Image: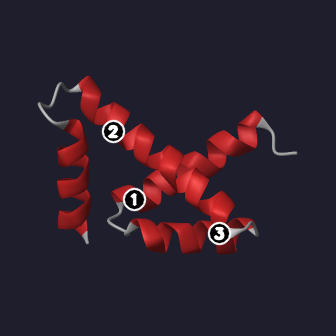
């Protein structure tokens, strides 16, 4: 069983990869490889990381945070 601390660490690592401009599919692959987990688990971790990025954008009151997240992510690719 994965601890809350481990989940938080994995999510933060995925957030860092996203903010470095990696696509979600690359992040899924890197997380699966680094953590030795299934791609399904890596997709859940990456989805959690995207929620963290979106929440950060919500804090700065952007009109459409989902679109802003997507655009920022695409610009970084």
Tag 1, which secondary structure? helix
- Disc 2: which residue: 54
Find the distance from the CA under tag 1 to the CA under tag 2.
12 Å
Residue farthest to the left?
63
- Disc 3: which residue: 39
Q: Residues within 10 Å of mark 3 (few under 14, many from 20)?
A: some
Which residue is depicted at the point 33% across and 33% down?
56
Image quadrant where residue 6 sits: top right
Q: Decide: marks 3, 2 in contact (CB < 8 A)?
A: no
Which residue is depicted at the point 63% across and 51% down?
10
Tag 3, which secondary structure? helix
Quadrant of the image containing the N terminus: top right
Q: Earlier in the sequence, mark 3 or mark 2?
A: 3
Q: Position of residue 73 (x, y in %)?
A: 26, 59
- Disc 1: which residue: 18
Quadrant of the image containing the C terminus: bottom left
Q: Position of residue 48 (x, y in %)?
A: 52, 44
- Give the label, 1 or 2, closer to the camera: 2
Image quadrant where residue 25 sits: bottom left
Tag 2, which secondary structure? helix
Which residue is depicted at the point 45% across and 61% down?
17
Image quadrant where residue 71 sits: bottom left
Image vertical order of residue 3 relative to residue 39, above or below: above
- Give the label, 3 or 2, closer to the camera: 3
Find the distance from the CA under tag 3 to the CA under tag 2.
22 Å
Which residue is depicted at the point 22% across and 37% down?
65
Q: Position of residue 24 (x, y in %)?
A: 42, 65
Q: Residues within 10 Å of mark 1 (few under 14, many from 20)?
A: many
Q: Which mark is residue 33?
A: none
Q: Earlier in the sequence, mark 3 or mark 1?
A: 1
Q: Earlier in the sequence, mark 1 or mark 2?
A: 1
């Amino acid at each position: 069983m994965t601890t809350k601390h481990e989940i938080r660490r994995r999510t933060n690592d995925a957030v860092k990869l996203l903010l470095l401009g990696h696509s979600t599919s690359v992040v899924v692959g890197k997380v699966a490889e680094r953590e030795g987990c299934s791609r399904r688990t890596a997709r859940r971790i990456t989805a959690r990381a995207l929620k963290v990025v979106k929440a950060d954008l919500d804090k700065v009151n952007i009109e459409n945070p989902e679109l802003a997240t997507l655009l920022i992510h695409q610009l970084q690719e």
